[in-house]
Amino acid sequence: MTSPDPLPALIAAERALDRHWWETHRTDAARHGGVAWSGLSAAPSPPRTDAQIRKAAEARQRFQDAWRNSSQGATLSAVARIQAACAAAHAAAERARSAAARGLPSNPAPCQAALVEARSHAADLLRGLRAARRALSGL
């Protein structure tokens, strides 16, 4: 299974950063209008071009990829997957407990489905543990 290309999301984040910067500059300029001494406020730089935004997003992607491929990044990413799997397994086990408490003998299907889901999350947990161990061995 291939991951989706992160570049479009990074480009969108760079555009959002530009919008935020311009809105902040506009708000500050309005706040200081008429009060600031002439010539002391910096003129805003021109908005970044699409090519500059794409270049910044690509640089961010290279940085993220380098971090993710480092031992520390791989370890932390694996630990985050472990935590997510634990939380999902806990939620599935809670659904199984609730279904069992509501009347297991008459309707075991909800409990069984929740246990199947919990087992799937347990497998994700084990994969995350193996990934963390591999990442730590690279230190």
Image (cartoon, grey):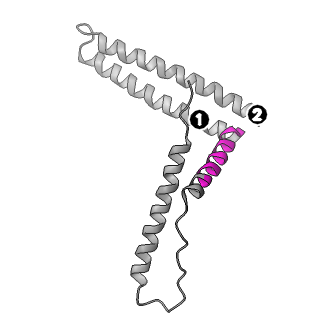
Quarter of the image for the N terminus: give it.
Answer: top right
Residue 44, position as x, y percentages in the image: 52, 75
Q: Secondary structure at mark 1?
A: helix
Q: Foreground: 49 or 28? A: 49
Amino acid beneath label 1: Val
Mark 2: give few (<14), some (14-19) or many (20+) Cα within 10 Å.
Answer: few
Residue 43, position as x, y percentages in the image: 53, 79
- State which region is magenta: 55-71
Residue appearing at x 66%, y 48% in the figure: 63
| Inter-mark Cα distance, 2 to 1 | 15 Å
- Judged from this view, the residue extending furthest toward the top is 105
For residue 89, the mark is none
User: Is residue 62 shown above or below 87?
Assistant: below
Q: Which residue is mark 2?
A: 138
Residue appearing at x 34%, y 20% in the figure: 97
59 in the magenta segment? yes
